[in-house]
Image (tube, rainbow, N blue to C red):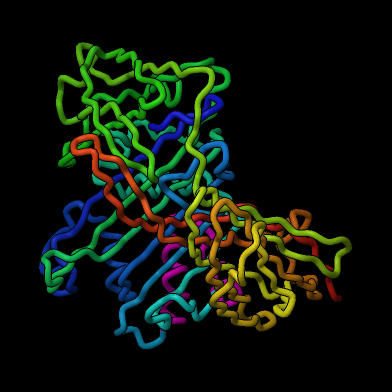
Amino acid sequence: MPNLPNSYVQVNILVLYATHCFSPKCIFSVSHYQLFPKSLGQVILKFSVSELHISFTQGYWRTMQWGQPFLLSPPGAELWVWFQDTVTDVDIAWKELTNVLSGIFCASLNFIDSTNTPLGVGNVTDQRFLRSAVLPREIVCTENLTPWKKLLPCGAKTGLAVLMNSEKFFHSSFYSQALHITPVCQDWQCKSTAWELRQTLNVVFDLHSSGQEWSLFKMFSRTLLLTEACPLAFSSKVYVDVTDNPQVSNLTLATPLLSQAVVLEDRRTYSVYDLTNQATFGQTRSLNMLLRWRAAENMLRPLLHGERYVAGYGLQKGEIHTLVYNHHTYRAFPVLLLDTVPWYLRLYIHTLTAPASVATTNPVSYIHYQPSKDRLQPHLLEMLVQLPPNSVTEVTVQFERALLKWTEYTPDPNHGFYVGSSVISALMHSVVAMDTNSCLFSFKYRLNTYVAVVLSVLVYHLM
């Protein structure tokens, strides 16, 4: 639970578990799925899915105020799927899979079709078996949280799941739930693999009314008490970020452990509460803690940050501006910018420019563009951009709005048409000073940032 500036509190919940085998023969030889949800296991086997990522997000992540998020996802619904090479017709499998997932998560994923599914992502090794789509106008509500909780090993009856109060979650400033299924190697030669399932939940609470303090009771509910860990959990811990607030009042008289970790090039100190230890709950048989923060806090400014807006006047033409910030003082970063634009915004690719705020050579070294087809497929623009240190790179492209039939308008045409977020991917260098031997260890990690400002436009119609 990191403490954000301006009386915001972020809550991250991660549930991680895996199967013992990956092959269909091994799955069908057992009588039950143990911890892995059977509904997802059957879907993976039926459609020969190798990897799956799905997220539902409501709200806008304020990167400059809250810093870089731990769990990234764009507004609305996002789905990424890698199929196995045994699939003969990927498009048919993709369509059937979205319909099944729409029923499992009570979402509008059945509206995913060829018009919002880009084909041919340039930086993927085998792009034939990759499909992705974003529904930026998808509304996230309790109907999406309930099936997500049912996939947990202990459901919503015990463990951290008892704190998942829908009324509190959907009155927050930011809410995001996701599910990731990836294959992991069981040995160093990767001869045997297993499915790893990660369920993540990211919520930002606004506690202005609570003054300069928060507690579990205030954030969640006084009736939903955290009294025990999930009996099926091998490890269940609560981490409270106390880097800027070293004084935490533990209302259950339990003594937490202090642990240090490096997150996004910043050393943080956490107070750790082990839920599998009964002494954590104290005499009250429930876990509660109170934290008071200081009036002024210095938040680590994110190294990469993106913004996007539409410019122009009138309803015929316009221009999309994407601003990518590099706040590092001396290091330049190559970033991969991936943008999917609907077909009814006809891009003028010859107007594409990417000047930087500082004097440099051409920052764009690679461009992959796939034009759209009216009512069939969207635009796909992928660029490799070199960001100079301490600079702002502005990527602009002009477009023209197409004429639509009156039957092609959405149910709420007064909202306009939403365009999905751009994706910024970068391989970052992290240099951390280790206190034990005063040496510098340099390693790399991948950072994805979503330009989460949706673009709303109005389009003429043709009778």
Which of the image's four quarters has the C terminus? bottom right
- Quadrant in the picture for residue 312: bottom right
- Of all residues, the one furthest to the bottom in this rendering is 88
Closer-to-camera residue (74/62): 62
Q: Which residues are magenta?
A: 90-117
Q: Is residue 108 above or below residue 262?
A: below
Q: Name the residue furthest right.
A: 314
> How far from the left and from the top, in percent, is residue 369?
59, 80
What residue appears at the point 65 percent right and 81 percent down from the top-left corner?
A: 372
- Does the rendering let one see residue 346? no
Question: Where is the N terminus found, in terms of image quarters?
Answer: top left
Residue shown at the point (41%, 52%) measured from the top left: 178
Vertical comparison of 346 with 457: above or below: below
Q: Is residue 151 above or below residue 24?
A: above
Q: Residue 78: x, y in percent? A: 49, 60
Horizontally, residue 418 falls left or right of residue 138, namely right
Q: Is residue 329 magenta?
A: no
Residue 266 or 141: which is nearer the viewer?
266
* Residue 95 painted magenta: yes
Q: Is residue 353 above or below residue 276?
A: below
Q: Please identify the dominant SS of the magenta region.
A: helix
Q: Is residue 397 visible?
A: yes
| Front-lying residue, 255 or 29 | 255
Estimate the x, y position of residue 212 in percent, counting from the top left.
Answer: 50, 16
Which residue is located at x 18 percent, y 66 percent? 185
Q: Residue at x 25, y 28 (%)?
A: 272
